[in-house]
Image: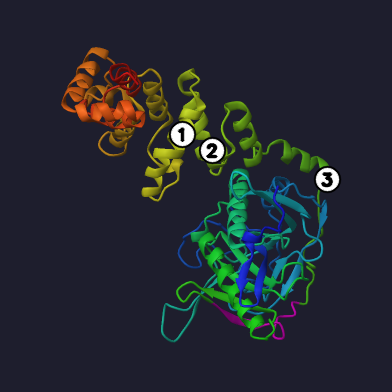
């Protein structure tokens, strides 16, 4: 595991190198049918104010009632983060006034959160891994949404999101570059999706980040941090960190000081700008919510939830390496998305036959992944089935097609033959590779006869063999068995 002394992570300034220190507060919307303290729907995309109960609208006399499923989701997530689960936690009122907060306070957890310290292992490359500490995870209500672009002279409030359960997952300041922060959010989102406690859809606002950034000279005490609020994509998180670190270094190198403040990132202008300073920061006047008893559960509840957790990404990666002989890199790529990992295993074992897992992994992480990327989809979202992946691998394994012809088969599956069996495609388009040595010998003899000068060069320089292989493949429409071509050429040329 790497330490954080790597000079490659430092940012060079006019007065020498600087180190950026990053901590993240992730707000993850809990996957549940109803809100944290009411029975209103949490479904995304309803008409404005159509998913609002009397509790969400803060009507007089309405009392919150805790949603047990949201509590279970928080515990599951804590277990996935290898964190301490607190059997007793307290809900507090965080008091502030804003149009999209009907109660005038947010029910949150302050001093006594449901989940304590944990950790997330993050792969930065096949050889570098960091451990990011988790400070805490607490449950809280989301606020509504203010809309300022529906009219020139007025603002509107949509309370559909008001009262939806959030998990705020607070990291320790353990990240030292934008790349580390992006990799951490990616891994955390993967863990949440595996557990099923948050869908991680940042474009719908169900995963958002507050990014804390400070800079210091290597080895110096921590600098003053600024918080960048509500960053809603992994790419923007990386950009915001780089822009803010550069801004702070510029201020310090000009002899200024960093004010602790809340800032916003503007991706269009590639800048952060001040939102409010520490001096104006809210005093939230937290106090325990008098309408809610402390939240208490026993170890048996935790054990029952732990028992039913799915296999998580780190465990699945270790199993793929041990069971299938995959490289750490291939295993990481496959387990980054649960459905992709499932599709890999289904393909390896399709129809009760066990295939070469490395060949399946190469096909999925290579050509299938390239196709998925070109469509803006995950591998599992494409129409390519485990049956088709297994079929292509089987045809290559029994020498019916070469790896080059396998690309042609996949090209048909991604265009005109979306639901076809690979074997049917091979027959229909005559893609079967030529293994008849007589036909290959004939093509070799013709090319040798036409190129006596190249024959002499090849005898002196055996690397010229590749040119001959290319010519034979071209003459046979790419269908000759490459291994047979190589062997026949070596014999004929005396190499």
Q: Residue at x 39, y 44 (%)?
A: 370
Report the residue marked by disc 2. 330
The mark found on residue 362 in the picture is 1
Q: Are marks 1 and 2 in contact (CB under 8 Å)?
A: yes
Expressed as whole percent of the image width and height from the top left, the position of residue 72 reads 70, 48
* Camera-side residue of 18 and 399: 18
Q: Is residue 316 above or below residue 36?
A: above
Q: Which mark is residue 298?
A: 3
The picture quadrant where one finds residue 228 is: bottom right
Q: Please, what secondary structure does the residue beneath circle 2 have?
A: helix
Q: Residue at x 77, y 63 (%)?
A: 91
User: Circle 3 — which element?
Assistant: loop
User: Is residue 339 highlighted in magenta?
Assistant: no
Mark 3 or 2 closer to N-term? 3
Give the image location of residue 295, x and y in percent: 79, 56
- Quarter holding the C terminus is top left
* Residue under the image location 38 percent in, 24 percent down: 391
- Residue in front for this viewpoint, 340 or 65: 340
Q: Is residue 255 above or below residue 422?
A: below
Position of residue 242 in the picture relative to residue 203 (left or right) = right
Q: Residues within 10 Å of mark 1 (few under 14, many from 20)?
A: some
| Residue 348 seen in the figure | yes
x and y percentages locating residue 50 in the rendered image: 50, 64
Label 1 or label 2, whichever comes before in sequence order: 2
Of the numbered discs in the image, which one, if any, rests on residue 217?
A: none
């Amino acid at each position: 595991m790497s330490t954080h002394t790597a000079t490659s992570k430092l940012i060079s300034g006019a007065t020498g190198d600087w180190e950026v220190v990053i901590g993240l507060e992730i707000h993850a919307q809990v996957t549940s049918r109803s809100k944290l303290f009411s029975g209103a729907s949490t479904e995304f995309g309803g008409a404005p104010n159509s998913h609002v109960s009397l509790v969400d609208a803060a009507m007089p006399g309405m009392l919150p009632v805790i949603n047990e499923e949201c509590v279970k989701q928080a515990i599951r997530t804590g277990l996935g983060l290898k964190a301490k689960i607190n059997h007793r936690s307290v809900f507090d009122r965080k008091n502030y006034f804003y149009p999209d907060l009907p109660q005038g306070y947010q029910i949150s957890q302050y001093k006594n959160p449901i989940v304590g310290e944990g950790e997330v292992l993050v792969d930065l490359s096949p050889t570098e891994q960091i451990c990011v500490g988790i400070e805490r995870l607490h449950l809280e209500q989301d606020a509504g949404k203010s809309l300022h672009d529906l009219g020139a002279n007025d603002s509107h409030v949509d309370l559909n999101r008001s009262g939806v359960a959030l998990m705020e997952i607070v990291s320790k300041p353990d990240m030292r570059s934008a790349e580390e922060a992006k990799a951490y959010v990616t891994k955390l989102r993967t863990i949440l999706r595996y557990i099923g406690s948050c869908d991680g859809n940042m474009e719908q606002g169900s995963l958002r980040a507050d990014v804390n950034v400070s800079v210091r000279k290597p080895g110096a005490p921590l600098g003053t941090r600024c918080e960048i609020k509500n960053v809603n994509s992994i790419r923007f998180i990386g950009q915001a960190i780089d822009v803010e670190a550069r801004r702070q270094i510029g201020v310090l190198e000009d002899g200024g000081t960093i004010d602790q403040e809340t800032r916003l990132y503007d991706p269009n202008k590639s800048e952060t700008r001040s939102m409010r300073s520490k001096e104006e920061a809210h005093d939230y006047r937290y106090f325990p919510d008098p309408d809610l008893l402390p939240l208490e559960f026993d170890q048996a509840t935790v054990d029952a939830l732990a028992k039913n957790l799915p296999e998580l990404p780190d465990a699945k990666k270790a199993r793929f390496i041990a069971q299938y002989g995959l490289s750490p890199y291939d295993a990481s790529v496959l387990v980054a998305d649960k459905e992709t990992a499932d599709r890999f295993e289904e393909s390896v074992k399709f129809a009760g036959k066990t295939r070469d897992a490395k060949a399946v992994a190469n096909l999925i992480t290579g050509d299938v992944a390239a196709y998925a990327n070109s469509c803006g989809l995950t591998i599992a979202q494409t129409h390519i089935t485990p049956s088709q992946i297994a079929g292509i691998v089987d045809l290559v394994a029994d020498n019916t097609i070469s790896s080059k012809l396998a690309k042609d088969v996949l090209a048909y599956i991604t265009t005109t033959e979306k639901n076809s069996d690979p074997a049917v495609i091979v027959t229909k388009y005559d893609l079967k590779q030529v293994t008849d040595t007589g036909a290959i010998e004939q093509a070799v003899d013709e090319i040798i006869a036409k190129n006596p000068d190249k024959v002499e060069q090849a005898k002196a320089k055996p690397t010229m063999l590749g040119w001959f292989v290319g010519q034979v493949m071209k003459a046979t429409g790419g269908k000759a068995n490459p291994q047979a071509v190589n062997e026949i050429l070596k014999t004929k040329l005396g190499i």
